[in-house]
């Protein structure tokens, strides 16, 4: 008995010594390691790598950029069931232990003794936070000690909920998703609050092995891990037996969900992305910036639809270029093989890829993939006469077999609705186009389309393409002429003209589009009908330098423009966005604004780090300033005002003349909109290489352009009013829906005079064909001009058949 007591005492002494030795060892280790431990203070203001997100002005997602997908959540935003699932899977004593679970560590030590190998184990959620935020993934005893000491420090300085929040936002779940918010979106396309119990358990089972337990790459292992989590939740009393029984019966429902933009605006998104990288460097992709832009989601969709409709219409007018590819269906005969083939073909601009499976006399059957067959009737095929060149097509079709055979890879378009589809044969247009729309009162970009499909061609033609504006530039020339004393009734002779320039290989003989000459013509009528020779003579009269001064007022860079008379025909190089800003001067009352597309930027903590302060048109502010009111007397916050660059009188006359372009000129198709407050100008360059329509409402400017990237001709008849105007009309139809009319207001002091339409001079009281014209008082005609009298620029009313003038 004494011997037993002695042994017990010795055992107690050894245990005590061992315990003291262990404490001494831990103390020594802590003394050695503690100075190397990082400060936990950084966790109070941790900045997780969060992608860049871009939103429209109505707060709809446009795009997301960044390698890591993360949706940071607060603890209060995490559902209770998700909290319990992670406790069951990772650390059920999290809310009880001080950061280190000694029971778990003892289990890990016993396993080490039994197996002789180090294994992962005993790590609490706090220890995982320490490892993920501060330590390397290496598996060594020293790193484990650092992890333990750091976890204890974290627990001493942060609350449990804060630690749990950090954990669920930091851990990796596979497929570029970090944090439970991103995992819910990646695997189920949901917010965390929308997940089912089975989905929550699947996500909770991922951190241990994001690749091998992944529901996308290994569904069987994912179910095993999910069921383990569910069993643990049941055992711990976190769920009821009935909930458990339902959840384990659910099959794998996960699928890969990419970020879903709510608006299709990739050209615009790329502009914003480039701007953010220029401001913040590569941190733009990781610091959680949220960019709120000027884009209007409703009008962006309208712009997308309008451009694609116009380009497809042009493409159909010029014929079918043939099928993209052919597949021998006698060798590739199953739907699975067809699906594999079609999976490499993407939908481009709303045009679906499909395989022709049957050809009938006047219809074809087409396979679109995943078991879906559609039929194209004759109305959807008969347009496809063979393309010969831009001016010629083959003969009219008689049967479908003339253009298609079984196995052809084609493009199809649904011109109906989902419930009542109307399938047509289509092809990806080679021609390109652009549409840009701005708010003329601030310069805010409202809609941007840079081409038929961004993923087919990323070149943003709305901003980057420098093309000749053609007759659209005449507005600048006419505005300059009005400031030089010309009026809407001034006569300029529309007659042949030759420019003998030694720098040119041959003399330049410009012509009107029609090839005809019409003699003395009033400026209003010349602009309405886009008479080239009138514009050239007008530019010669006012001088090229004066016209370039006016162009600079409209926001154009004079160095991009020629310093010769070809300027009258728009031979410079400008982008559609530049035209939009120029035409904003005509729309907003005569003020120059600058384009912008970012309203404000928020950082990852939702602090505003940038806020736009654009120049705005404010006639009331301008009036108050002119009256000498002090800044403190202005109502509301003082905003930078857009400078006036043309007078109200000039603005009124230009608007009045350009409204006639729509009412009775080259843009009469726009009358379909049924409005009296629209104005604009068509533009067509030599050989129809560029087709434009530049149009505006007092509160909205839109520029549409159509052309080939190679600058080859569009073909006979493909002028601005045919190729580009339809896109503008379709866009404005949506943009101006329910917008009240905005009548053009005549500035005080201007006068209306009855004039002779042939001479531009005051009409006699009894003249039957007299018309009304508006003038500045100093420019109003005082009396009639006698027959044959000089009209002011060297031309007489009877000179319509004058010989060529050589300059």
Image (tube, rainbow, N blue to C red):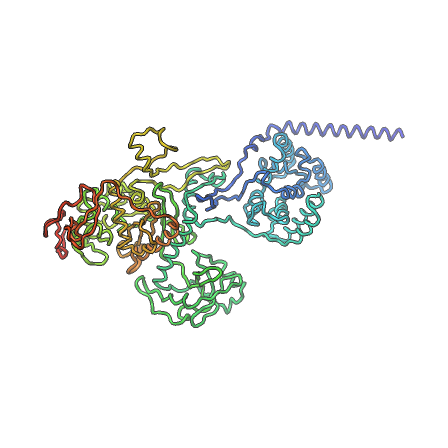
Q: In the rendered view, does 744 fall on the left or right side of 276?
A: left
- Number of numbered tags placed on the structure image: 0
| Residue found at x 45% / y 70% | 359
Outermost residue toward the right in this view: 1
Lateral position of residue 457 relative to residue 532, left or right: right
Residue 92 locus on image (x, y percent): 68, 40
Residue 304: percent from left, percent from top: 40, 52
Q: Quadrant of residue 150?
A: top right
Asked if residue 481 shows in the view, the reply is no
- The residue closer to the viewer here, 173 or 148, is 173
The one of 323 and 74 positioned closer to us in this rendering: 74
Report the residue that reaches farthest toward the front: 766
Image height check: is 399 above or below 293?
A: below
- Image coords of residue 151 (percent x, y): 63, 33
Please tell me which residue is depicted at 62% across the width and 49% down the height of the picture: 196
Residue 609 or 414: which is nearer the viewer?
A: 414
* Residue 200: percent from left, percent from top: 62, 47
Residue 86 visible, this orientation: yes
């Amino acid at each position: 008995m004494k011997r037993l007591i002695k042994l017990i005492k010795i055992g107690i002494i050894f245990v005590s010594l061992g315990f003291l030795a262990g404490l001494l060892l831990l103390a020594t280790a802590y003394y050695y390691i503690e100075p190397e431990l990082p400060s936990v203070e950084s966790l109070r203001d941790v900045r997780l790598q969060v992608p860049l997100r871009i939103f429209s002005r109505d707060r709809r997602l446009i795009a997301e950029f960044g390698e890591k997908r993360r949706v940071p959540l607060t603890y209060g935003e995490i559902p209770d069931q998700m909290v319990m699932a992670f406790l069951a899977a990772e650390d059920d004593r999290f809310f009880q232990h001080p950061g280190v679970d000694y029971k778990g560590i003892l289990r890990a030590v016993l396993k080490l003794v039994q197996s002789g190998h180090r294994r992962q184990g005993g790590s609490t959620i706090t220890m995982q936070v320490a490892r993920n935020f501060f330590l390397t993934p290496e598996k060594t005893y020293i790193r484990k000690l650092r992890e333990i000491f750091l976890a204890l420090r974290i627990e001493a300085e942060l609350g449990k909920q804060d630690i749990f929040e950090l954990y669920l936002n930091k851990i990796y779940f596979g497929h570029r998703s970090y944090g439970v918010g991103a995992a819910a979106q990646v695997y189920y396309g949901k917010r965390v609050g929308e997940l089912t119990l089975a989905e929550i358990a699947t996500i909770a089972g991922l951190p241990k092995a994001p690749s091998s337990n992944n529901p996308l790459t290994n569904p069987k292992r994912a179910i095993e891990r999910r069921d383990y989590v569910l069993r643990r939740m049941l055992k711990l009393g976190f769920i009821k037996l009935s909930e458990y029984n339902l959840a384990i019966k659910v099959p794998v429902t996960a699928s890969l969900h990419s970020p879903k933009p709510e608006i299709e605006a990739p050209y615009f998104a790329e502009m914003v992305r480039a701007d953010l990288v220029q401001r913040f460097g590569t941190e733009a992709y990781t610091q959680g910036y949220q960019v709120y832009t000027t884009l209007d989601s409703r009008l962006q969709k309208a712009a997308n639809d309008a451009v694609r409709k116009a380009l497809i219409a042009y493409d159909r007018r010029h014929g079918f270029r043939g099928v993209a590819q052919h597949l021998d269906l006698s060798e590739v005969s199953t739907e699975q093989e067809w699906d594999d083939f079609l999976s490499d073909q993407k939908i481009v601009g709303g045009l679906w890829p499909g395989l022709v499976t049957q050809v009938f006399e006047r219809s074809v059957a087409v396979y679109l993939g995943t078991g879906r067959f559609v039929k194209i009737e004759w109305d959807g095929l008969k347009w496809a006469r063979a393309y010969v060149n831009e001016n010629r097509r083959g003969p009219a079709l008689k049967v479908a077999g003339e253009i298609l055979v079984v196995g052809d890879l084609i493009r199809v378009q649904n011109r109906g609705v989902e419930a009542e589809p109307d399938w047509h044969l289509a092809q990806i247009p080679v021609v390109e186009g652009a549409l840009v729309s701005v708010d003329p009162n601030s310069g805010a970009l409202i809609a941007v389309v840079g081409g038929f499909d961004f993923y087919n061609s990323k070149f943003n033609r709305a901003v980057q393409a420098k093309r000749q504006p053609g007759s659209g530039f005449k507005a600048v020339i006419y505005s300059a002429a009005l400031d030089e004393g010309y009026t809407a009734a001034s006569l300029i002779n529309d007659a042949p003209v030759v420019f003998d320039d030694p720098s040119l290989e041959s003399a330049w003989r410009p012509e009107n589009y029609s090839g005809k000459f019409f003699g003395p013509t009033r400026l209003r009528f010349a602009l309405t009908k886009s008479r080239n020779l009138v514009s050239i003579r007008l530019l010669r009269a006012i001088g090229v330098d004066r016209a370039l001064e006016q162009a600079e007022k409209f926001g154009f860079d004079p160095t991009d423009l020629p310093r010769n008379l070809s300027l009258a025909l728009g031979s410079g190089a400008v982008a559609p966005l530049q035209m939009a800003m120029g035409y904003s001067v005509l729309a907003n009352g005569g003020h120059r604004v600058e384009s912008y597309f970012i309203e404000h930027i928020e950082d990852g903590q939702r602090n505003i780090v940038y806020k736009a302060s654009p120049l705005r048109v404010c006639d009331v502010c301008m009036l108050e300033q002119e009256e000498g009111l002090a800044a403190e007397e202005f109502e509301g916050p003082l905003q930078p005002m857009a400078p006036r660059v043309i007078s109200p009188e000039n603005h009124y006359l230009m608007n009045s003349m350009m409204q006639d372009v729509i009412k009775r000129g080259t843009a009469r198709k726009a009358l379909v909109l049924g409005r009296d407050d629209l104005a604009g100008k068509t533009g067509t360059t030599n050989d129809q290489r560029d087709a434009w329509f530049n149009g505006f409402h007092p509160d909205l400017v839109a520029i549409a352009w159509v052309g080939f990237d190679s600058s080859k001709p569009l073909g006979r008849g493909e002028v601005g009013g045919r190729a580009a105007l339809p896109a503008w009309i379709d866009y404005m139809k949506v943009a101006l829906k329910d917008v009240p009319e905005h009548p053009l207001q005549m500035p005080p002091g201007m006068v209306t005079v009855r004039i002779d339409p042939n001479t531009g001079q005051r009409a006699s009281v009894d003249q039957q064909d007299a018309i009304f014209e508006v003038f500045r008082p100093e420019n109003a005609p005082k009396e009639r001009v006698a027959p044959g009298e000089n009209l002011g620029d060297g031309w007489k009313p009877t000179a319509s058949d004058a010989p060529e003038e050589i300059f």
